[in-house]
Amino acid sequence: IRRLCVILGDQLNRDSALFDDFDSTQDLLWMAEVQEESTHVPSNKQRSVMFLAAMRHFAQQLRDEKLPLHYSSLDEVCLRDFSAALAASLQQYQPLQVRLVLPGDYRVLQSLKRCCAEHHVPLELLGDNHFIAKPGEFTAWQKGKKQWRMEYWYRQLRKRTGTLMRGDQPEGGEWNYDKDNRGTFSAKGPGMLEAALLFSPDSLTQGAIDTVERLFPENPGNLLGFGWPVNRAQALQLLDFFIAKHLPLFGEYQDAMWINEPWLYHSRLSAALNLKLLSPREVIAAAEKAYQQGEAPLNAVEGFIRQILGWREYVRGLYWSLMPEWLSMNALDAGHNLPDFYWTGEVDMHCLAQSIKQVLDHGYGHHIQRLMVTGLFAQLWQTQPSQIHAWYLAMYVDAIEWVELPNVLGMSQYADGGIMASKPYIATGRYIAKMSNYCDHCCYKPDEAETENACPFTTLYWAFLRKHRPLFQKHPRLALQVKHLDAQSDEKRQAIAGREQWVRARYPANTYSTT
Ligand code: FAD
Ligand code: SF4
C-alpha cells in the first residue's frame, strides 16, 4: 500500500481533498467505528446513531463506486479508539504514508499523530476544503487585532465570496438585520407549522440503531423516532424543504421558543453540515437564491447566512487558534457540579424540562434553547466548565468539538473571559418568559427572586451578579445591571442568598462523577 487514506466520521464528503489524487491501484481508504467516540463522553444514542448510520451509508457509496476500502464495524470488532484501530491497520497493510484531512477534534488529531509517530509512518495532513475560509485566512485576519469579533470576520467573508453583496456594499445597505429578528409568538403560539421532514430508518440505519442499543444501552437518549438525514440525498431533500417551508420566517422567529415545538422555523441542517453531507457553500447559495427570486425576505436570508458564513466559520477559526488552552480556562472560577437533571430531564423548571427532554428524544435544541435555557442555567449555577462542555458534547446530534466547545465555553459560559463573546449572556427568568410560553406552565414565577415561588433563574441571576460584581462593574454593557443590584435593600439581598441555598439543595449534583 502506498497511502492509507483515513476518513473520520465527520468527513463524509466525496469532494474532500483526500480523493484528489487517490489511486485505486495503490491506495486504500480507511474508516473505523470505535468505542471511544460513544464513551469518552456518554454520547446520546441519537448522536451515536447519526454518526454510525451516516458512516455506513458513505461506506456503501464508496463500495458501490468500487473504491478500495477498509471498514471496521463495531458489530465485528469492538476497537477501543482511533489510535488502536489505526495501529492494527498499520501493522496489517504496512503503508508508506497515512493521509488525513484535518480532524474536527484536537484530541483525535493528537492521538492519530502519536500513533503514526510510534509506528514510524509519515502522516500527511490535508486542509479541509469543506470550509469557506481558506487555510491560514483566519490566522491572517486575527493578526494585529486587539479583539476578535465575529461581525468583522463575517463581513470579510461576505466581501471575498460576494455573498449578499451589491458591488462592495451589503445587499439592502446593512450588514446585519437582527433588529427585525427578535419576534415572539402571540398568546396563540406559532399556529400550524409544517410538519418536520423526518427520514424513516432504512436497513443500514436500523443496523446502526441495533448496534447502539446493544453496545451502549446505558447511554442517555432514546431512539424512537430517529429521523435525521444520514446520506447526501436526504440532506439535500432537507435543505430544499427548509428553503421552501421555513426560511421565510426563520429570521423573525429565530429566538422564539414554544412548548412541545422542538424545531419551529429552524433548519435542522447542522448535523448534515458537520458530517459534511452538505457543503456550506451550497446551503448559502440556496438561501441567497430564494432571496433573489423573492421567495424569502432579506432579514431571514441574511440572518440564516450569517449563522453559517459568520458564526460557523468563526468558531472553527477560534477553536484551532485557542486549543488546547481553551479546555482549561475558567475565568469566572466556576466550581459547582452539573445538576443531575441535565441527564434525565426530570426537573420542575418547565423551560429546562422541555429543552432537555427534547435533547434526549431528538438530540436537538435550537440556538436559544442551548444558549438561554440549558446554557444560561449552567452559567448561573456556576458549573465547572469541563462538566458542561462534556454534557453538550455528549447530547446533541451535531456536536463535534470544534463547533461545540467555542459555543459552550466561549459564548455560553464566558469561561474564556470574553475572547468569544463581548459579555456574558446572563438574564433572569423574565427573558425566558418574554421569548416563550414555558413560564405559563411552570410552578415558579419568573419575576420573583426571593419568594417561595421564585424562579431559580432569577434567584441565581442576582447571586451570580453579586459574586462577580467587581468584574462586571467595569463592563460597559453590564453597568446598568450592577446598578440595579446595588439598589437592592440588605433585606432583599439576604432573602436572595437564603433562596439560593434552597435552590442548590433542591437540585442535587452528583451524577457526573459516576457517569
Ligand atoms: P439553524 O438555526 O437553522 O441555523 C443554521 C445553521 O447555522 C446551523 O445548522 C449551523 O450550522 C449554523 N449555526 C448557527 N449558529 C451557530 C453557531 N453559534 N456556531 C456555529 N454554527 C452555527 N452547533 C453545532 O453545530 N454543534 C454544536 O455542538 C453546537 N453546540 C452549541 C452549544 C451552545 C451552548 C450554543 C449556544 C450553540 C451551539 N451550537 C452548536 C450552535 C447552534 O445552536 C446550532 O448550530 C443550531 O442550533 C443547530 O440547529 P439548526 O441546524 O436547526 O440551526
Ligand atoms: Fe423557567 Fe423560571 Fe420560567 Fe419556570 S418560571 S419556566 S424556571 S424561566
Image: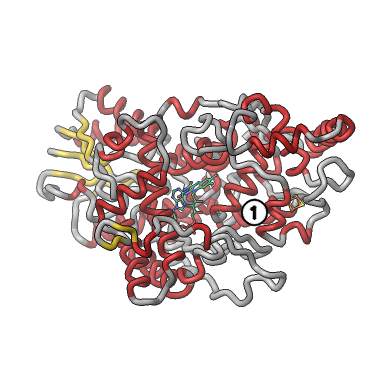
Residue 304, image x and y in percent?
43, 60
- The image position of residue 77, as x and y in percent, is 39, 42
- Which residue is at 72% across, 35% downward? 483
Q: Is residue 60 visible?
A: no
Where is mark 1, residue-wise? 355
Looking at the rendered structure, the number of numbered marks drawn on it comes to 1
Q: Quadrant of residue 287?
A: bottom left
Residue under the point 55% across and 43% down: 392
What's the amino acid at mark 1?
Ser
Image position of 350 (left or right of 371): right
Q: Residues within 10 Å of mark 1 (few under 14, many from 20)?
A: many
Residue 61 or residue 370, whichever sits in front: 370
Q: Quadrant of the N terminus?
A: top left
For the point 78% across and 40% down, the residue is 459
The colouring scheme, among rainbow, by chain, secondary structure or one colour, is secondary structure
333 vs 100: above or below: above
Expressed as whole percent of the image width and height from the top left, the position of residue 496 reads 83, 35
Q: At x 72% / y 39%, what residue is drawn?
A: 461
SS for dot 1:
helix
Judge by depth and name the residue closer to the eye, 432 or 342: 432
State whether residue 442 appears in this view. Answer: yes
